[in-house]
Amino acid sequence: QVQLVESGGGLVQAGDSLRLSCTASGRAYSGRFMGWFRQAPEKEREFVSGINWSGGVIYYADVVKGRFTISRDNAKNTVYLQMSSLKPEDTAVYYCAAGGYGVPGQYSYEYYYWGQGTQVTVSS
């Protein structure tokens, strides 16, 4: 089992930055790729970014590429999502997820463990 707890969400203005954190616990965490997803009201959950265990393979959704940066500190069991140049359309609940092994997945079904989510609201 893997337990995930996100933090760092909040209300910011357009153009601001925010860093989300996801801290994992549980013996099954080691070796897994991690991802961030988001879900806006009345929209489907969408992939934001994924990172493999070593941090050497990273994927981003096109809509966040160049603005968001994913990273991880395996010694701290923590994954980060640094978000810059935030836009109102980035408003959503952001979820951290733990998947399998190898290259990070880009679909929800590739992830087995999910956090409770953290709200990010960007005002215009």
Image: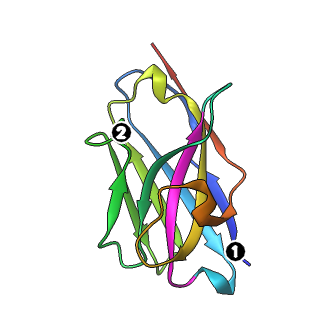
Q: Residue at x 62, y 54 (%)?
A: 6
Q: Residue at x 63, y 29 (%)?
A: 43
Identify the main secondary structure in magenta.
Answer: strand
List x then y, in percent, for residue 9: 57, 40
Circle 1 — which element?
loop
Q: Is residue 94 above or below residue 77?
A: above
On whether residue 49 falls in the magenta region, the answer is no
Q: Is residue 74 above or below residue 113?
A: below
The label on residue 2 is: 1
List x then y, in percent, for residue 52: 41, 72
Q: Quadrant of the C terminus?
A: top left
Q: Quadrant of the N terminus?
A: bottom right
The label on residue 64 is: 2
Residue type indicated by callout 1: Val
Q: Which residues are magenta?
A: 30-39
Q: Quadrant of residue 65?
A: top left
**Viewer-side residue, 42 vs 64:** 42
Q: Residue at x 38, y 36 (%)?
A: 17
Q: Is residue 30 above or below residue 87?
A: below
Q: Is residue 4 above or below residue 74?
A: above
Q: Quadrant of residue 42?
A: top right
**Taking the image as drawn, is residue 120 in sight?**
no
Q: Residue at x 43, y 60 (%)?
A: 50
- Sequence-first tag of 2 and 1: 1
